[in-house]
Amino acid sequence: MAELKITAGNFDREVKREEKPVLLDFWADWCGPCKMLSPKVSQIANEYVSKIKVGKVNVDEEPELSNSFGVQSIPMLVLMKKGQIIASSIGNQSIENIKKLIDDNI
């Protein structure tokens, strides 16, 4: 399963109303650490397809959505459940750390 592009227009449907936990990746095209994190997020999307939904938020295209999450540094991962933030991390993470973030919180 590929990651979903999350926008202000589909946020309620794809994130807030989702029964599964949702991992959001806040990123930008110009961000080097974001590019290093992206394949790991894709791997998580494939490995955890039955457990979580994975979405990507481009901070340049969705400034209001990014601001609503208080994004000041990217990449930023946010794990949500039933519309509430349950965990987050900032910066490039190892695949092990991302799995731990998810496994410890879902």
Image (cartoon, grey):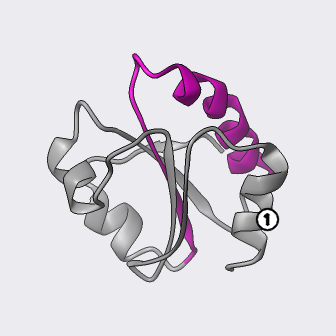
Q: Which residue is mark 1?
A: 100
Location of the C terminus (image quadrant): bottom right
Q: Is 50 included in the stretch rendered in magenta?
A: no
Query: Residue at the spot x=39%, y=27% of the render?
Result: 28
- Above or below, comparing residue 66 to residue 5 in the picture: below
Q: Which residues are magenta?
A: 20-47
| Horizontal side, residue 44 vs residue 82: left or right | right
Numbered marks: total? 1
The N terminus lies in which quarter of the figure?
Answer: top right
Task: Please provide percent x and percent y for residue 47.
Answer: 81, 51
Q: Where residue 85 appears, x then y in whole percent?
A: 44, 75
Check residue 44 for magenta coloring.
yes
Q: Is residue 90 left or right of residue 84?
A: right
Residue 24 horizontal/vertical position (percent): 48, 54
Relative depth, front residue between 95 and 49: 95
The correct choice, above or below, for 60 with respect to 79 in the image is above
State whether residue 9 appears in this view. no
Q: Quadrant of residue 56?
A: top left
At x 72%, y 37%, the residue is 40
Q: Residue furthest right?
A: 96
Element marked by disc 1: helix
Label 1 environment density (alpha carbons within 10 Å; few <14, some 14–19, many ≥20): few
**Residue beneath the point at 67% across and 38% down:** 42
The foreground one among 64 and 44 is: 64
Q: Position of residue 59 (x, y in %)?
A: 30, 37
Residue in the picture at 78% in, 59% down: 99
**Residue 104 appears in the figure:** yes
